[in-house]
Structure formats: structure tokens, C-alpha cells
Image (cartoon, rainbow, N blue to C red):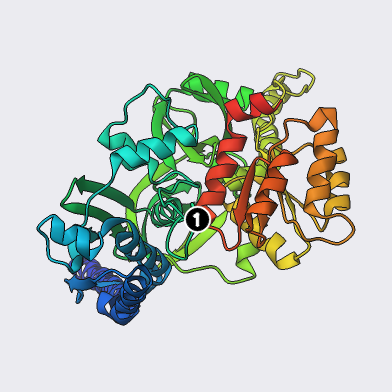
């Protein structure tokens, strides 16, 4: 009997081992299939740069005709593939760089022959891989940047003191200033003061960068380093209780280990020190409305993650940092896009669905409810201990919560579509947003709460943007309130009129989202807020 029992146990063990092995094999197959699916998705998004070559050749031909110059274009490495989304977003920037090379870089045929050059100028677009990025260089054999003329124009615009010399690096930086142009007269190609700043903003919005190199008399090179694809992003996986989420790695500023005493102080004060400031503090599970506190008792090493978006930071207590992963991000549909803080969704290699959050945007909406859950969870153990000793139950004394200083942005536009699109853009960056359909409604909103900055259209019923700006500047309490006009009226007379009314910045439609966010960040930063106050 004993031998039979031993044999039965051995048989059960072998069966369990086979079952476990089969399960592991199935999971491995699923993970492999998921990776293949991800690679297939990327392949469908990749297109050759040559696909827009006809469009670029046409731009150079037209610019040559308009300027009376002889210019030819060569494309090297055009078979390199890029993400279709990246290529579509950057094509207008590529076209502007080509026009810029023809208008500002390439000299006239007579000047070139006098300098010993071929009468026909040459522009070369050179593409090659740089790790996970692709480099796109626009190189011309023209005269290079005219630092002397750039300096003269900078002095006229008040960007450079009259007795100060301009270095080559400073000259290169000036050409990216909004409104800066060295053209002698306004034309379709040059002199309008817009272009290179928008190009750099568009590149930055994709997470890329632009480098400029110039040799006097030999030409200028603009090197654009762009991501191969925006469908893949790096996220830091965090676990709070049974919930795991992803946070874009570019938002994660610090992962810190703290002791039990520091953790208790953070819960008591609802804030955590980061440098010289106190950052709003949350249990990640409470912020996600999944749990009220960690199931693990405060230990010697507790994990706090500091996340930054726009000008705001929050500190999150999590159970575990699961690591950094490269994931394929699926865009949210119209229903999920309304959820605050939800930035995207992805399927991990294990087959699990991962939600990708912006915790700063989440805290701006659910922060107070999360604090209430944390306070209730802190009071619960104290009540239980008091009951055991027969002492009367009293709430745990806590300090007043530190209200998150999330800037409010007032968006004024008669188009509900524009209002909603702008609202989602700002909320994803962690801002609070108030909406108004015209100037009169905006004045009502201003009486309820003063925003950090006002974004206003011009053409609106009842009260237009100009009248709104005039009313704001007439109120002594709102004299320093920043106003950004966003309109399709881009004529200089409208810009000048807006300046006389005290408008801080004037954006023409269509505008770069990154440029708008840069302005909002500038006006909602601490020094700007103090100056406005």
C-alpha cells in the first residue's frame, strides 16, 4: 500500500510538472505572437521618405522660379523608412526649410560665379539612421549665415545691445526667434517673420531636435534628428496594490526610497519635499480610485515616484516599480479620451492590457477625493487601537491638506469643437480648464475664479476678443492677466491693434500645439505668476 501511495504521489507530481510546463509554453507562444503583432503594426506604419520626394522637388522648382535662382535638389538615402505620422507632420517643416535654403542660402547666379562657384546652387537632403532615430539633413552650398546682418536685425528688434558683438552660436539661435527675419522685403518665401520657430516647435513636439552648422561662403546645414516612429514609447510600469499602470518615462523625474518616518510625514502633511518645494503627495491607488492605502506596512525602504507634467509635480507612493518598457501605444477613442489623465492604452508582451496615465492631470481632477480616502485609511487603525483599550474613539489629527496649485486656463472661442480640442490638449498637460463661448461669458468666468492665462479668439458673438481684452485691461485687478489671441486674422494691422490693447501674444491659425503649450507654460510658471500678481 505504501509503495502504491508513493507511486500515486509521483504520478501527480509529474502531471503537475507537465501542466505547468504546458502553461509556460502557451504563455511563451502568446508573448511571441504579441511581439510579432507589434512588429507587424510598426511595419504597416513605416513608409519610405521617397514618397514625398515629388512634392519636395516641386517646392524647390517653384522657389527657384520665384527668386530667379538656379537650384537643384538631390536626395540621398531616400529609401529609409519613417513612421507615416512623423512624415506627415514634418512635411510642411521640410518644405519651409527648402524655401529657406533657396531664399536665404543660395546666392544669385552672378554672385556665385564671382565667388568661383557653379552658377547653379545645390541643396542635398541626406538621411541616415542614428540608433532608434533618423537624421534628416538639409545642406546647401550657399553663402552661409550672414552673422553681420543677423546682428543688425537683432539690434533693430531690441534683441541685442548696440555695443555687444554676436557670436556664431548666438546668431544661430536668433534665427529661431518668433518674428525674426533678415529679408529686406516681404514675399511669399521670406520676410514674414514666421517659419524657423514653428519648425523647431514641430520637431520638439515629436521629441526630436534640430542642429545648425554654417560655414561662411560654403553653406549651411540644418540637421533634424527625429524618432523613427511615435507609435512606440517608453513607459515606467508602476504597481499600487493589484493595479498596474504605465507612466510615460519622460514624465518621471525621480524614483526615491524613503524610510517609514518620512512616509508617515508625507501622509500626515499630504506633501513630500522635492528640492526646495513641497510636492502634493498621494497614494497611487487612491488617485486611481482602486484602493485607500498600501497593504504593505511602512518599511525601511518605501518607493515614492515624483512625476512632472507642464509646470506641476506630484509625488506618488507605490508598492513597486516594475521597470521600463517599450510599448506600442493605441490612441484612445472618443469615449476614453474624455477620461482625465488617461493618455493611452497598450498591450504588453505578456498579453496584459496596460493603461497609460498622466498622474498630474489625474491629480488635478481626483486629488481631493484621493486625500479623503487617504485620511480615512489613516484614521482607521487608530480607531481600532483605541477600541481595544476602551478609550473613546477620536479622529486622527491631520494637518490641512496642501491644495495642489494647478493653474487654471480660460479658453474663449465660439466654436465648441475648438474649445473641446483645446481643453483636452491642456488637461493632458495637467492644467485645469474653464470654457467660455464669447467675451461676455468669459467676463462671468473671470468673476468666479481668476485664471493664470486667457486664450481668446477674436471673432465671437455678443463680445469679440478685442472688446474682451479691452475690458480685462480696464479692470485694475486684472491688469497683469496674460492674454494670448488665437485667430485666423494674421494681418499686421490686427496684430498691431491687439498690441495696443495689451495682448501679450498673438497666434495665427493654424498654430503649433507645442508653441501654444510653451507659451502657457511660460505664463503659468512661478515667476510669471508672481509678475502677473
**Would you say residue 402 is visible in this rendering?**
no
The x, y position of residue 470, in whole percent, is: 82, 42
- Total marks shown come to 1
Which of 162 and 309 lies nearest the eye of the viewer? 162
Identify the image quadrant of the N terminus: bottom left
**Would you say residue 503 is visible in this rendering?**
yes
The x, y position of residue 134, in whole percent, is: 24, 62
Residue 251 placement, left or right of 213: right
Quarter residue 232 falls in: bottom left
Which of 308 and 411 lies nearest the eye of the viewer? 411
Is 266 above or below relative to 313? above
Residue 321 placement, left or right of 468: left
Q: Residue placed at 54% from the left, 56% from the top?
A: 513
Residue 148 placement, left or right of 484: left
Element at badge 1? loop
Q: Residue placed at 56% from the left, 40% from the top?
A: 521
Which of 447 and 138 lies nearest the eye of the viewer? 138
Q: Residue placed at 67% from the left, 60% from the top?
A: 489
Q: Residue furthest left?
A: 116
Quarter residue 271 falls in: top right
Residue 394 placement, left or right of 105: right
Which of 195 and 377 lies nearest the eye of the viewer? 195
Quarter residue 530 falls in: top right
The x, y position of residue 361, in whole percent, is: 60, 47
Q: Residue placed at 69% from the left, 30% from the top?
A: 403
The x, y position of residue 113, in whole percent, is: 14, 61
Identify the image quadrant of the C terminus: top right
**Mark 1 highlights which residue?**
192
Q: Residues within 10 Å of mark 1 (few under 14, many from 20)?
A: some
Amino acid at each position: 500500500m505504501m509503495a502504491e501511495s508513493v507511486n500515486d504521489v509521483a504520478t501527480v507530481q509529474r502531471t503537475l510538472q507537465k501542466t505547468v510546463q504546458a502553461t509556460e509554453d502557451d504563455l511563451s507562444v502568446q508573448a511571441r505572437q504579441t511581439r510579432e503583432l507589434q512588429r507587424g503594426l510598426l511595419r504597416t506604419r513605416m513608409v519610405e521618405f521617397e514618397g514625398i520626394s515629388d512634392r519636395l522637388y516641386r517646392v524647390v522648382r517653384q522657389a527657384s522660379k520665384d527668386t530667379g535662382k538656379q537650384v537643384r535638389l538631390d536626395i540621398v538615402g531616400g529609401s529609409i523608412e519613417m513612421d507615416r505620422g512623423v512624415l506627415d507632420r514634418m512635411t510642411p517643416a521640410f518644405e519651409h526649410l527648402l524655401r529657406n535654403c533657396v531664399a536665404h542660402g543660395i546666392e544669385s547666379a552672378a554672385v556665385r560665379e564671382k565667388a568661383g562657384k557653379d552658377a547653379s546652387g545645390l541643396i542635398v537632403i541626406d538621411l541616415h539612421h542614428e540608433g532608434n532615430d533618423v537624421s534628416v539633413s538639409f545642406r546647401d552650398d550657399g553663402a552661409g549665415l550672414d552673422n553681420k546682418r543677423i546682428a543688425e536685425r537683432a539690434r533693430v528688434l531690441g534683441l541685442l545691445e548696440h555695443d555687444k558683438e554676436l557670436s556664431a552660436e548666438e546668431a544661430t539661435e536668433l534665427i529661431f526667434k518668433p518674428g525674426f527675419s533678415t529679408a529686406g522685403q516681404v514675399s511669399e518665401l521670406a520676410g514674414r517673420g514666421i517659419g524657423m520657430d514653428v519648425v523647431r516647435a514641430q520637431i520638439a513636439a515629436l521629441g526630436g531636435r534640430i542642429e545648425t552648422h554654417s560655414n561662411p561662403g560654403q553653406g549651411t546645414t540644418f540637421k533634424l534628428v527625429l524618432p523613427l516612429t511615435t507609435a512606440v514609447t517608453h513607459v515606467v510600469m508602476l504597481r499600487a496594490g493589484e493595479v498596474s499602470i504605465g507612466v510615460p518615462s519622460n514624465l518621471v523625474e525621480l524614483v526615491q526610497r524613503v524610510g517609514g518616518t518620512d512616509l508617515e510625514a508625507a501622509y500626515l502633511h499630504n506633501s513630500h519635499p522635492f528640492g526646495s518645494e513641497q510636492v502634493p503627495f498621494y497614494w497611487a491607488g487612491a488617485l486611481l480610485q482602486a484602493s485607500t492605502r498600501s497593504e504593505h506596512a511602512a518599511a525601511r525602504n518605501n518607493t515614492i515616484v515624483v512625476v512632472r507634467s507642464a509646470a506641476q509635480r506630484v509625488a506618488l507612493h507605490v508598492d513597486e516599480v516594475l521597470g521600463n518598457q517599450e510599448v506600442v501605444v493605441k490612441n484612445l477613442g472618443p469615449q476614453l479620451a474624455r477620461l482625465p489623465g488617461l493618455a493611452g492604452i497598450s498591450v504588453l508582451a505578456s498579453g496584459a492590457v496596460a493603461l497609460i496615465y498622466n498622474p498630474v492631470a489625474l491629480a488635478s481632477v481626483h486629488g481631493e477625493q484621493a486625500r479623503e480616502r487617504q485620511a480615512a485609511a489613516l484614521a482607521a487603525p487608530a480607531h481600532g487601537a483605541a477600541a481595544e483599550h476602551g478609550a473613546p474613539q477620536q479622529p486622527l489629527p491631520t494637518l490641512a491638506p496642501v491644495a495642489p496649485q494647478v493653474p487654471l486656463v480660460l479658453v474663449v472661442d465660439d466654436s465648441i469643437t475648438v474649445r473641446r480640442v483645446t481643453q483636452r490638449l491642456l488637461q493632458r498637460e495637467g492644467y485645469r480648464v474653464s470654457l467660455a463661448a464669447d467675451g461676455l461669458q468669459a467676463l462671468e468666468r473671470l468673476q468666479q475664479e481668476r485664471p493664470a492665462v486667457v486664450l481668446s479668439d477674436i471673432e465671437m458673438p455678443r463680445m469679440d476678443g478685442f472688446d474682451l481684452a479691452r475690458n480685462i485691461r480696464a479692470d485694475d485687478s486684472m491688469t497683469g492677466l496674460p492674454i494670448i489671441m488665437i485667430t485666423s486674422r494674421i494681418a499686421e494691422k490686427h496684430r498691431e491693434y491687439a498690441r495696443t490693447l495689451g495682448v501679450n501674444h498673438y497666434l495665427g491659425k493654424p498654430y503649433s500645439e507645442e508653441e501654444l503649450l510653451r507659451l502657457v507654460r511660460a505664463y503659468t510658471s512661478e515667476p510669471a505668476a508672481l509678475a502677473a500678481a
